Image: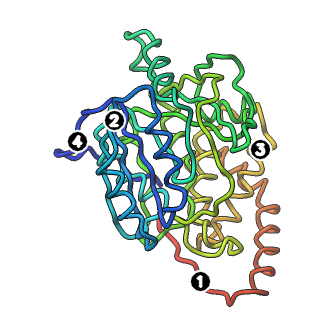
Amino acid sequence: MRAQGKQMPDTPQGHYTFTVYTGTRNRAHTLHRPYDSLRSQTFRDFEWLIVDNDSTDGTAELVARWQAEADFPIRYLRHENRGHHGSSNRAVMEAQGEFFLTIDSDDGCTPNALERLKAVWDGIPPDQRHHYSAVTALCVDENGQPTGDRFPSDVTDSNTTELRYRYRVMGEKWGFQRTDVMRAHPYPTILGYTGMMSSHLVWGSIGRQYLTRYINEYLGTVFSDQQDTLTKGSPRDPRRDALGEMLEAASVIDLHLRYLRYDPWAFYLKAAKYSRSGLWAGQSLRQQARRLSRPFARVLWLAALPLGLGVYAVERTGLARYIPRRHSRGIAR
């Protein structure tokens, strides 16, 4: 189940090279990190687009001060909390940059980050760029330590699914996507759902059509000292993120089976996660089977069903110990 991309007639076009997007909720105490990073950029053709999900901590007043003093454009939009995916979808439609780059509300980047990302894109031969949608680099944490594996070579042309399952590249990465491609591949929208929605639902879908150029340069900085504020519900409650987890697992085992031979165990675990998350999302086993379009995906799901059911049973027992059980909201195919 993927929401269909739709280009609106009045969608802003590329007035800037980059739209740098930050989704936030009650992060006034950390927003200076992306702000300071953008103030120090050596490449200046960008806008900063902040989407505020109902903050109550003075974020609006803080951003207003920055808008008055900054030497780059800052746009501030506010709406009710729609979660990471809803906030990102709105930002993509509002973006006025050719490229869409996310900096989280508690993260940053190197002063030359935008300059390097643009230079790498420009290094792709013009007659080949229509095959590409993105440039992605590496990250370090607040202590300067790498947050994940390096890419197979210093310049790797691939996609996010191949990197994960063929090359076993794990960990936090950072880069931009073409804005027009992002508009055609939005996050699924489910009324009332503000749990986590895996970015693989977007990157995996894009990766079936486009290449990403991956570079072994550390350009992003990821901090680990904050808790998520855009996701509602208790992290101990498996129902909170069940819909997003179910959709992500289904997309992997149904749409990316060509990578099964590289890491069959990982696909088996995804199939188990699909059944476990589906049950928490209110999807019967019959509904889960119907959602998978490929016969072999159903075979894989059946093979992993005992593990998925077992995990679900254990979690149900644990959940009953600390919170009264409620029926989660299901979704129809």
**C-alpha span from label 4 to label 3:** 41 Å
**C-alpha span from label 2 to label 1:** 38 Å
Which of marks 3 and 2 precedes in the sequence? 2
Q: Nearer the viewer, residue 303 or 156?
A: 156
Q: Is residue 231 left or right of residue 259?
A: left
- Confirm whether residue 261 shows in the render: no
Q: Which residue type does callout 3 highlight?
A: Ala
User: Residue lying furthest front in this view?
Assistant: 69
Q: Quadrant of residue 275?
A: bottom right
Q: Which dot, 1 or 4, sits closer to the camera? A: 4
Q: What residue would you read off at disc 2?
A: 180
Which of marks 4 and 1 precedes in the sequence? 4
Q: Which dot, 2 or 3, sits closer to the camera? A: 2
Q: What residue would you read off at disc 1?
A: 327
Q: Which residue type does callout 1 highlight?
A: His
**C-alpha span from label 1 to label 4:** 41 Å
Q: Is residue 154 above or below residue 283?
A: above
Q: Residues within 10 Å of mark 4 (few under 14, many from 20)?
A: few
Which of marks 3 and 1 precedes in the sequence? 3
Q: Which dot, 4 or 2, sits closer to the camera? A: 4
Q: Secondary structure at mark 2?
A: helix
**C-alpha span from label 1 to label 3:** 30 Å
Q: Which residue type does callout 2 highlight?
A: Asp
- Residue 44 x %, y %: 37, 29
Which of marks 1 and 2 precedes in the sequence? 2
- Residue 315 x %, y %: 78, 74
